[in-house]
Image: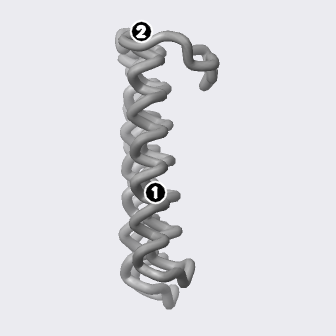
Amino acid sequence: MDLISLIVVLIVVGLILGLINAYLPMEPRIKQILNGVVIISVVLWLLNAFGLMGVLPRGLVSVTVVLIVVGLLLSLVNTYIPMDSRIKQILNVIVIIAVILWLLSVFGIISGLPKIHMGNF
């Protein structure tokens, strides 16, 4: 991809995101999540466009993306699903323990857990 195309795409994405933030009525929390997702997507796209994605270990990228998605989903559940605060605490603890166990299993620190594959990792 040449530099001109790259700059044009970044300008278009910035303008679209600016228009969405300025003119679409949304809760500020949803705008923050949308902005975060777009920024992460643009950074990953830029890394891929410059060929740096191949330098990073593919498994590390997969783990990072899974952690971001789980965090966003947990944040959305905590914010928009009406539940008793005690139930939300229990749900958060269960998700955090599951993610920690999954990470320990992925990196080979513990064994004996069923293998859960995410992507090519």
Q: In this picture, is 13 found above or below 58?
A: below
Residue underneath mark 1: 72
- Between disc 2 and disc 1, whose residue precedes? 1
Q: Quadrant of the C terminus?
A: top right
Scheme by which the image is coloured: one colour
Q: Residues within 10 Å of mark 1 (few under 14, many from 20)?
A: some
As rendered, which of 117 and 55 lies closer to the eye? Answer: 117
Q: In this picture, is 95 found above or below 63?
A: below
Residue at 46% x, 17% y: name it: 106
As rendered, which of 8 and 70 lies closer to the eye? Answer: 70
Per the image, label 2 sits on a secondary structure element best described as: loop
Q: In this picture, is 112 found above or below 77?
A: above
Asked whether residue 49 is in view, the answer is no
Q: Residues within 10 Å of mark 2 (few under 14, many from 20)?
A: few
Quarter where residue 3 is shown: top left
Q: Are marks 2 and 1 in contact (CB under 8 Å)?
A: no
Per the image, label 1 sits on a secondary structure element best described as: helix
Q: Between marks 2 and 1, how big is the CA–CA gap?
A: 26 Å
Percent across and percent down for residue 60 are: 40, 20
Residue at 39% x, 34% y: name it: 100
Asked whether residue 44 is in view, the answer is yes
Percent across and percent down for residue 56 are: 36, 14
> Which is more foreground, mark 2 or mark 1?
2
For badge 1, the amino acid type reads Leu
For badge 2, the amino acid type reads Gly
Residue underneath mark 2: 108
As rendered, which of 77 and 101 lies closer to the eye? Answer: 101
Percent across and percent down for residue 88 are: 45, 70
Residue at 42% x, 9% y: name it: 108
Label ID, residue 83: none
Residue at 51% x, 86% y: name it: 24
